Amino acid sequence: MKTGGNLLAVAAIAVCCLVVWFCASIKGSPKTYEVQPWITVPEYRTEAARAMDAYEHLMDRYVDLTERSLFNVSTDVREVLKKLDGVDQKLIELCARIARIEKTLGIEQPAASIEAKPQPTPPDNTANEKSSASPMEN
């Protein structure tokens, strides 16, 4: 019975090997697949990178705001300049009218012409510093 038991053991091992071989052949050879992702994953960004991007965006908005403000100021200055030119033209016309009226009435021009007042000079910062320093010394 030893030979029958050995034969049975060899047959069992052979059956196991065949089962394993069939399972491997059913599975087939390893296949490779090429996967093309349709979903994109956003890049990893640190908090510092996000803060810098936010700061750049804020500065871009500030520059745009400043440009618009300067454009509005220049437009306002142009309008004021036009009004001042109109006032200057009217003053010239008034001076000519007054001169004609004075000539018609025989009013003589004063001998000394009215002198223009000298423009005041802006105060020096050193004078302000001295005046602000003197009360402390007392």
Image (spheres, grey):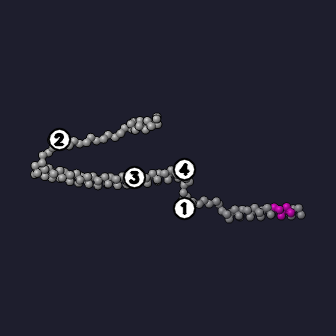
Give the residue furthest to the top.
Answer: 137
Disc 4 packing (10 Å; few <14; some 14–19; many ≥20): few
Type of residue at label 3? Thr
Residue on which the image places disc 3: 66
Residue on which the image places disc 2: 112
Q: Name which of mark 2 and mark 1 comes first in the sequence.
A: 1
Horizontal and vertical percent position of residue 100: 12, 51
In the picture, which quadrant includes the N terminus? bottom right
Q: Name which of mark 1 and mark 4 comes first in the sequence.
A: 1
Residue at the spot 45% in from the left edge and 51% down from the top edge: 59
Residue at the spot 41% in from the left edge and 35% down from the top edge: 130
Magenta residues, start to end: 5-10
The Cα–Cα distance between marks 3 and 2, rounded to whole angstroms, is: 51 Å
Residue 19 seen in this snapshot: yes
Type of residue at label 4? Ala
Disc 3 packing (10 Å; few <14; some 14–19; many ≥20): few
Nearer the camera: disc 2 or disc 4 = 2
The Cα–Cα distance between marks 4 and 3, rounded to whole angstroms, is: 27 Å
Q: Does residue 7 show up magenta in the picture? A: yes
Disc 2 packing (10 Å; few <14; some 14–19; many ≥20): few
Type of residue at label 2? Ala
Is label 4 in a helix, a strand or a loop? helix
Horizontal and vertical percent position of residue 124: 37, 38
Q: Nearer the viewer, residue 50 or 66?
A: 66
Nearer the camera: disc 1 or disc 4 = 4
Residue on which the image places disc 1: 39
Horizontal and vertical percent position of residue 3: 87, 62
The Cα–Cα distance between marks 3 and 1, rounded to whole angstroms, is: 40 Å
Residue on which the image places disc 4: 48
The Cα–Cα distance between marks 2 and 1, rounded to whole angstroms, is: 91 Å
Residue 100 seen in this snapshot: no
